[in-house]
Structures are given as C-alpha cells and as structure tokens.
Image (tube, rainbow, N blue to C red):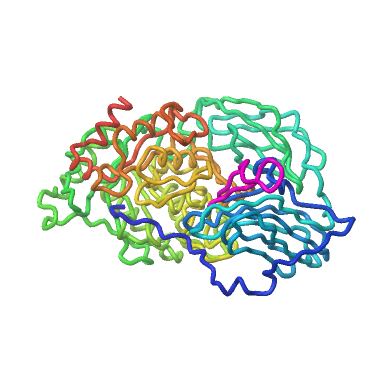
Amino acid sequence: MDRARRPRPVLTALTAALLAVPGITALSSAARAADADVAVNGGFESGLTGWTCTAGTTVTSPVHSGRSALQATPAGSDNAQCSQTVTVQPNAQYTLSGYVRGSYVYLGASGTGTTDVSAWTQSAPDWQQLSTTFRTGATTTRVTIYTHGWYGTGAYHADDLTLTGPGGSGTGQPPAAPAGLRTTTVTASSVGLSWSAVTGATGYAVHRDGARVQTVTGTSATVSGLAASTAYSFQVTALNDAGESAKSAVVTATTSPGGDGGGGSSDLPAHALVGYLHASFANGAGYTRLADVPDSWDVIDLAFGEPTSATSGDIRFDRCPVTECPNVESDAEFKAAIKAKQAAGKKVLISIGGQNGQVQLTTTAARDAFVSSVSHIIDTYGLDGLDIDFEGHSLSLNANDTDFRNPTTPVIVNLISALKTLKARYGAKFVLTTAPETFFVQNGYQYYGTGKWGGQDPRCGAYLPVIHALRDDLTLLHVQDYNSGPIMGLDNQYHSMGGADFHIAMTDMLLTGFPVAGDPDNVFPPLRPDQVAIGMPASTNAGNGYVSPAEVTRTLDCLTKETNCGSYTPHGSRPALRGLMTWSVNWDRYANWEFQKNFDAYFG
C-alpha cells in the first residue's frame, strides 16, 4: 500500500510478422451439399448465446442480415475477442466465413490439429466478408472459432459467422431444460441441489440468483460460500456441444442460522472498520500511537512486517525509530496498548508486505522461515492474527499453472501451506485477512497468468488460488479498490476508480463469483458477505481512487440494500457485508477522521 501505482497492463502485443505466417489467408471454398453450418448462433440473433466474449454486446444496427449483430470494443490490453468451441470430424475440411466492419478485425480458428488459421482486414468501413479454410487433424474433434479487434482501435462489428463442413458427433440442437430441480441438504453456508437427467446433455450449469456459478457432469451439485439466514434462488441448465438449454424452473432455499461458518474469528462485530496503522514508519501522515486509535476501529493492522530479502521468508517487524517518529511509544507501552485494545474487543494483527515488502516463498525453506518468523512476531506482541498484503512481484503464476483450484507455482503453493500451518497452530480464533490489489483478483475475470497463448502478465489473477484454498480459513478479504487501472465487471463493462460504481462492481464480483479468464467451466466461487470488506483510501493523500463520504454511503446502500445504485446493478443485496477497510488510520487522523466518522454514522 501507500503508493500511486497502477498495475502494469497485460502484455499481449503481437509482432506484425505474425500476420504473414502461413495459414493467415482470405481464401473461400464452396461447401459440399452434405456439409452443414456447425457454428451456433453465428448471426447473433439470440444475443451472445453460444459465444464467450471478453467484451461485447449485440446491436440492432448496423447488421449484415437479420435483426442483430455483434459489437465489441477493444480497450486497454483486451482485444474484445468472442469465441465458440464447436464439435468437428477428424480429417475433415472446413470453411470459416463471416462478415465484419471496422479496423483490424480478425476471424480465425484454433485447435485445428493442423495449422491454425485466421483472416483479417485492415479497414472495412462497410460489411466485408472474411473467409479461410482448414483441415482438422487425425484426432481433432473440437475446434475454437473466434473473432476479435485490435488493441487501441475502435469498435468492430461481426455478423453471419459460419463454419461449414461435416457435422461432428453430438452437433445439432441444445438439450432440453432440466426438470425436477429440488433442494437437498441446506446448511448455514451451502445448499444442495438435484434434478432429473436430460437426454443428450453432457453437463449442467448451476445458476444462483441469475448468475452462473458452477458446472457439473452429474445431476446434483452443492453451492457453497453462502451467507447464513439468507434466501437464494437457483436454476439449472443442460449443456452439450450445440449449446446451453433454457433455464429450469426456479427453486428457492434459505440457509440456516449458523455460527462463524468457518473463516476465523466469530467475535468480530456484524459490521467492522479495518485500518492500517503506520507502526514502522511515519510517512507524511505523522506517527499515531496505538493507544490513541479511537475505539471505532475494530481491526488494526500493524504496518508492516518485511522480509530480510525477497526470497528469504524471514519476516522482521521493526518499530518506527525515534529519529523518524519522535512521539513513538516504548515497547512496553506498545504491548500494553495491544492488550488494552484486545480487552475492548478489538483485533490487532501484523500485516506482512506492503509497497516495499516483496515476499516470494520460492522454496520450502523460505516457507518454513516465514512460519517461524511470523510466529515469533505474533508471540512477542501477543497479536490476534495476520494480514497478508503481498504486492508488486510477490505473487505470479508459472506458464503452465492454469487452474486456480490446483496451483503448482511454488510461491503460491508455499504461501498457502504456510498460512494453513499458522492457522492450525493458533486455532479457530486466529484472524487471517488479506488485502490484494484488483490486478491480482478481479482482473482474473479476463486474464489468468500468462494466458492460453502466452504473453500476458503472469501476475494476473495470481491471488485467486490463495483465496480459494483458504476460503474456509479466511476471516476477511479486503481488496484494495485503489491505485488500480480500469477493471471489467460482471456486466462486461470497464469500471474506473473515483466513484461508487467501481466499488460496487468490484465487490459484487467477490460476492457473486466469476468465470476465471472468461471460462464458464472454471468459476471462482463467491465468498460469504461476512468475509468481505471494501478497501478504500482514507483521503486524497492516502492513494489514488479516493471517494467522498457520499459515494461511500452510496456504495454501502447499493450493496447492502440494493438502493441508491448507479449504472451497475449488483446480483442481490448483502446486508451481512462485513464493512470497510482503509489505508490508513494515520491518513484518516490527518483528515480529521472523515472516513471513521462516516462509517460510524452509517452503521451506528
């Protein structure tokens, strides 16, 4: 924290030389009489059904034929690709064709088993046909077709996309909607579902409150990560290679009352105020003694514990020297203040990392040193737990690490192991929180690691496997909704800092869940509302992305009551949302406690 750094853009630029390799062509061929169009909804008459788009919508004008066409706008590091995976026959000839408008528009096919192909146009002020052909490999049964624009250009349009050739086994119509949906086991944090099998279905998608949250191959599922005593609605769709069925009838369930439901301490207030206290430095805001922090602050993160080197795992907590902080208290006074806060029901944590504290647990030796040194800090000061504030290059994913549910990158695996060890050592009341940046969490909706084709920033979404592995141990996740670039929300629109909509969209992603890198079969499940706090800067001095108290109030109204919302509509109200986090207590004191006073006024 404590910097005005925007995340690096995702590195996806290609060289012009790629446009000249064999297979990039604009050929066409006549379809044989026995061939068929195996693409689904190529005219976009059914919206985006059958397509997976990083950014896109359907419009009624301009269209090449029919009533609708695709419109998509590249932005930042997103080329606005829409893709579809279709079933094909091995050793068969196919023709991919479509009509496009715009600058640098591409139409292509990947996974052909031979040479992947694409066609493109530099400029098409009116509808222009693109066409290319390919032959599938000896064992190829699925091919992905796609269209996209180019970085930094304007919107493009596409319509009447076809893939003509022999139909693959299983092509045809999507299956019928499932029947017989019912609830089974209902707990404080999960709902079990079952339904009747559908002929021709190869899988099923579960929808919670209208959002797709899970895919399964059988006829039952358990939706977890729910809030206690909360009503939810569920529907199921059937899937096959031709597409997705209509949704089933709705069933509703209300989760049972529960205790803490996992995730650490159960004695936080229903709505908590979390703040970072500059304990090892002054940083322009001045040093604030722990005893002088008002009682409104429920969780106080001592900033920061830092490593002796990036890869050592050896964490040290050095309190602010008197030369920098003339009013710093003695160790005895500091420890007494911790005990006094705890006696008043507050939690005092050590926060590891921050702007300058790069931590990379590349080896098991570093992992073990991390556990040992962090335990020493906790024991020395009698702290309640640990906050992970890994920033910069602390976490990144290896090129072959593509599944957030089963990570293989050492820095990820070792961190998860270390935190689970600490949780087990200190027990159920151990408070575990984390404060990642949006680039490492919500950006995973579009990008994960280096991506299927490589070239992306390996840090994209790198916190997701950590959060997922620790979701039953995590007390609070408070993403830093500041010092951030624009991030795409679940509405497939980019949201920027500076207003309530950004906080609403970013928080709704955590509470709804989202497909990682746009893959509907790889969904990051939602967290419980009581596990989530919203991270905001306390003042304009604290970081980029400051919002006024009125915008903070609008954020809370929208997320907890579904009132006072702006352009983004969340997927339901979450009255159990835990609260707010801010950088920092010191900067809020510098601003006459504006952030704290607004929190107190809202939650009482």
Residue located at (44% from left, 60% from top): 9
* Magenta: main secondary structure: loop
Q: Is residue 413 visible?
A: no
Q: Is residue 171 above or below residue 533?
A: below
State yes or no: residue 397 in magenta.
no
Q: In this view, does 28 lie above or below 62?
A: below
Quadrant location, the C terminus: top left
**Most foreground residue, 144 or 517:** 144
Q: In this view, does 30 lie to the left or right of 388?
A: right
Q: In this view, does 331 lie to the left or right of 307?
A: left
**Most foreground residue, 39 or 537:** 39
**Most foreground residue, 390 or 331:** 390
Q: Give the range drawn in magenta.
A: 55-73
Q: In this view, does 575 lie above or below 163?
A: above
Percent x, y of residue 280: 22, 54
Q: Report the number of discs.
A: 0
Q: Is residue 245 left or right of residue 268?
A: right
Percent x, y of residue 113: 74, 67
Percent x, y of residue 579: 37, 34
Percent x, y of residue 290: 20, 42
Name the residue furthest front: 126
Q: Can residue 316 be seen in this view?
A: yes
**Most foreground residue, 350 or 447:** 447
Residue located at (13% from left, 53% from top): 325
Q: In this view, does 400 lie to the left or right of 97?
A: left
